[in-house]
Every structure is written in C-alpha cells, then in structure tokens.
Amino acid sequence: MDTTKYQNMDITKLDLKKYNTNLTNDELLQFLEYYRVYRGRHRNVTDEECVDYCQGDFFQGLRVYNGLHGYVALMICIFGTIANLLNIMVLTKKDMAKAPINKILKWLAVADMFIMIEYIPFATSQYIYMKPGEKDYTYAWAVYILFHMHFTQVLHTISIGLTVTLALWRYVAIRHPHGACASFLLSHCNECILFSFVISPIVCFPTLLVFKVGERMQDDQLLYYVQTDKDSNLYRVNFWIHSVIIKLLPCCVLTIISFVLVKVLCEASKRKQKLKDYNNPNKASQEQQLQKHSTRIPKCDRRTDRTTMLLVAVLILFLLTEFPQGILGLMSGIMEKCFFDVCYQVFGEMMDLLALINASIDFVLYGLMSKQFRTTFKSLFFKRRLGSIELTRVTRLTTTCV
C-alpha cells in the first residue's frame, strides 16, 4: 500500500462523513495520538537504532549455548539438590550444629537447594519439552512464570544476604574474637539468619508490582503472558534496586570483607609463629635448622592456607555470579531498551548457569577445604564406628572454614 500521499495530509480538514463513520475530527486526532504513544512503547527492537547491538562471534556462541541450556541446567540442578541435601545432613549433626557459623551454612544450603528444586520443572518445560521458538500462552503457564520469577529472586536474595552475613561473621570472629561485637553475634546468630529471610522479600517487593499477567487477542484466541510497562518509573526504580542494592552492593561489601579477612588470617599466622619462637627460642633455632633441609610447610600455615583458599574460592564464585548480573542490569538501566531487549536477553541463560553453579558447588568446597566436614561426612555415611578420639580431636579444632 502506497502511503506517501498521506504523509502531509491535514487530518483537521478531512471529511469523515463520506467514510460513513460517526467519528469526529477531534476523536480521530485523539485516537492517532493514543496510537502514536502505543507504537512508541511497543516499537520493534530491530529498528535501525538497535541493529548494531551485541553482534559478533561471542554473542553468536551465547545463542548456540542457549539451545543447550536446558540439559546442562537440569544436570546441575540434580547434582546441586543432592549436594545441598548432603550439606544440610552434615551441618545438622550434633558436633557440627553447635557452631553458629555452621547454622548460617546450613540455611544457605536450604535456600540453594530450593532454588535447584524449583528450577528443575522450569528448565524441563521451557527448554526440553517445548521446541525452540515455541511459546506457551496459557494462563497456567503465565502464572507459573510469574511465580518462578518472584520465588527464585527472593531465594537468591536470601542466599546473597546469608553469604554477606557469613563474611561478616568470619571477620568479627577472627579480628575481634573476644570483643563485644563477637559476643553479640554469638548470642544472636538465629536473629541474624532470620534477618536475611525477612529483609529479602521486602527488598524484592517492587517486582510484585512491576510484572503481572496480561492478555491479548490473536486469531480469535485469548493469549496470556507476563507483561510490564518498561516506561514506568516503578519499572526503572525496580531495575536500579535489583542491579545496585541486590547485586552490586553485596559484591562490593563481600569483596572488601574477604580481602581484609585474608589479610587478617595471614597476620594472625605470623603472630602465632613469632609468639611460638619467642616462648621457645631453642626450639625456634632447631626449627630454622630443620627448615633449611626441608621444604615442608608448617601445619598451622597449611591450615591457614586452606582457609584462605576457601575464602578466595567463595569470593571468586560469588563475584563471577553476581557482578556480571549487576553490571548488565546497570547497563540496561543506563542504555535502556536496546541493550535490555537485544543484549540482556542473550545473557539470561548464561547468568542462570553461573547462579546454579554457585549454588551447587559449596559441597565440593567444604569437602576439599574442611577436615571437620570430611570427618563428619565419613562418620555419617561410611564409618559409623569412627573412633571417638579422632572425632573429638577434629571437632575441637578452631577453624574459620566450617
């Protein structure tokens, strides 16, 4: 249809009577204004201003992975569910449950486990059962997607809060083990855990107001989908809350605490070694002579190294998971529609993969880094008659790992 002849038409001089319509010129102008606003809000992101966004081999590789994400995520979720269940079983043992830090780790495993359990039906339906490009516009599926968004966001925020609490606890326990702050935290461990579970839904509450189930008619069929008004102020506020408060701020806090904690551990190890040398100068001189002929690292230093490695591993996993999401959210808030619709969606599956890996790998870290965790795990599943002397010796070790 050739529309060039209508481009310079003056609508106010249009005679609507010859078109057998009851519309007035003012009503037509109002309709055209509404239509212009609608088209502006729902314009296609493949317009010329967005065609140069996120092109190249890297993004093409991400799109290829997105086709395999369902199978990879399903395997990780099954492993992560079992691993976190084992974490809970070990950390609730009598000898392990006494330590406040293990209570935090236990509830962290609970939050991660429920994330895995909920993601299994979502990945199965969205990526395996449905064919590529297929959409489900039923009301039940729209409600489930809405539930999936809110449920995973709240639980993931709880997991972030517990991770920050864990870092704070470690810092206070090592930096000020006999101070008033340590005593306060020791007597209010359950309240600290409860705070993460209470504050997370409050922080995530704006998301409930931003997204809702919408409907539209297509080919005489009513379709349901999750919709949002991307031009509303509430949507922008929620985006900034999610990217800055929930993602970037905890990353910065945990990064600072972790680096300070590693430094404190190294300083504490050096002080212990100096004190040992001062109290027993003869033994110190003998050890110096032995160290000239041996490269074996002292036991205390090895334990400090294991703790440091665990902290670095937790830090790296957390940053790899949360920092990219926070940065992508921040860029989407700054660059708005083109970046969000073209680029952010491409990274969606990869961000989910990193979050799932982070939630499922803790069992491996505890097993590699904590002797107490390994001993309790063996006594629970393999060595039911483990000698009480060895178990008592291990559980009396002062450790900041688990």
Image: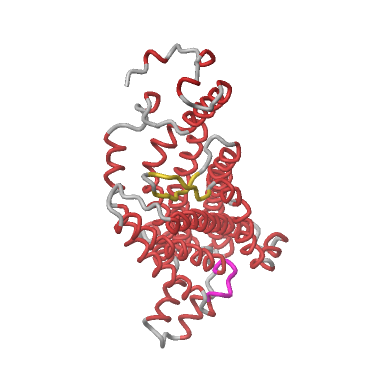
Question: Residue 293: image x %, image y %?
Answer: 35, 59
Whether residue 248 appears in magenta in the rendering, the answer is: no
Quarter of the image where one finds residue 7: top left
Query: Which residue reaches farthest right?
Result: 180
Residue appearing at x 42%, y 72% in the figure? 374
Whether residue 101 appears in magenta in the rendering, the answer is: yes
Question: Residue 128: image x %, image y %?
Answer: 29, 57
The secondary structure that most of the magenta stretch takes on is: helix
Colouring style: secondary structure
Q: In this view, does 112 lie above or below 205?
A: below
- Left or right, 8 with respect to 295, comes to right
Q: Looking at the image, how many numbered discs can be counted on the residues?
A: 0
The residue segment tinted magenta is 96-102
Residue appearing at x 49%, y 42% in the figure? 326
Question: Residue 108: image x %, image y %?
Answer: 52, 63
**Location of the N terminus (image quadrant):** top left
Q: In this view, does 309 lie above or below 248?
A: below
Q: Nearer the viewer, residue 172 or 6?
A: 6
Q: Which of 146 and 315 is in front in this view?
A: 146
Question: Residue 283: image x %, image y %?
Answer: 50, 65
- Left or right, 326 with respect to 137, comes to right
Q: Which of 292 and 334 is in front in this view?
A: 334
Q: Can residue 361 be seen in this view?
A: no
Q: Can residue 97 be seen in this view?
A: yes
Q: Is residue 200 above or below residue 299?
A: above
Query: Which residue reaches farthest bottom?
Result: 385
